[in-house]
Image (cartoon, rainbow, N blue to C red):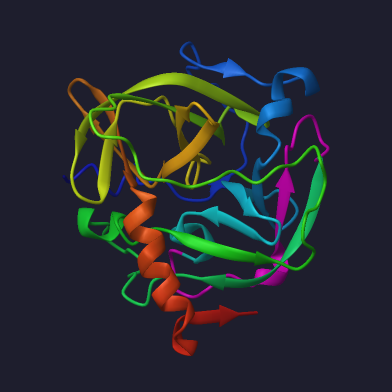
Amino acid sequence: MRFFLAIFLQIFWVAESLADTSSLTSLETLHQGRDWMAVGRLSYQNGQGFCTATLVAPDLILTASHCVYDLNTGELLDLGHLEFQAGWRNGRAEAYSAIAKSVTFPDYLVPNTPKMENVRNDVALLKLLHPIRKHSVQPFAIAALPNNQRSVAVVSYALGRINAPSIQSSCDISDQTEDILSLNCDVDFGASGAPVFYFSEQGAIIVAIVSAVVQTAQGRVVFGPLLEPSLSRLKNALSNESALQSD
């Protein structure tokens, strides 16, 4: 996996670029994006960089752990420079909030040389300074991926589509372990933390997030931690003061 480091997804430093979005549907208008307003950008330093994040409770968002660390120094980013922009499109968000606290796994290692075993720990919960209680921005539920489910959807912001989210409504699950999914989704820099959805009878439910991608001869393979086992472990971390990091 020597290519893993080169395209390991991290905060995307904004630059003009083109991306292949042939398998994606842009959610540029309010009508197209109304069901996905809880997905937004976790913006760093007024948009100099971002990841994708999702509202999962009025005061909590879900993203990848590496989105809140400086990958060069291994230090936690200044949370005062982060902002959640729910439903961001064309320069405006449906709701905004600064970040009050971040919670990551105690055994998450900020990767100088990313390894697969770190993917399962690449989950972070961020507490919002101002809870979002708008009818138009409803938090998504989290659940286990049903057995034998072979297709999921991803909603993300990324390189070449930084001003509106896009949805890939069907990407295949190529492999699954107890706590990591392997997918063929079309993602790029900035999609770190993007929610992976299963469409149930009750609507879209988050089952995983985007963590990393590896280039293979057949194309890109996306890896993401399954959230049911991850969140059970995060709840234990929440009870440990040493796991709670704040600005």
Pick whichever, 65 or 78, lies toward us: 65
Residue 216 location, x and y as percent? 20, 29
Looking at the image, is 144 positioned above or below residue 232?
Answer: above
Residue at 49%, 40% (x, y): give it: 195
Residue 71 location, x and y as percent? 43, 63
Looking at the image, is 32 positioned above or below residue 131?
Answer: above
Residue at 35%, 68% (x, y): give it: 233
- Magenta range is 71-93
Residue 41 location, x and y as percent? 65, 45
Q: How many numbered markers are drawn?
A: 0
The part of the image, by quadrant, that contains residue 165 is: top right
Q: Is residue 182 magenta?
A: no
The part of the image, by quadrant, that contains residue 40 is: top right
Could you tell me which quadrant the N terminus lies in?
A: top left
Residue at 68%, 28% (x, y): give it: 35
Q: Is residue 97 left or right of residue 178?
A: right
Looking at the image, is 114 positioned above or below residue 175?
Answer: below
**Mainly helix, strand or loop, the magenta region?**
loop
Q: Is residue 90 left or right of residue 112?
A: right
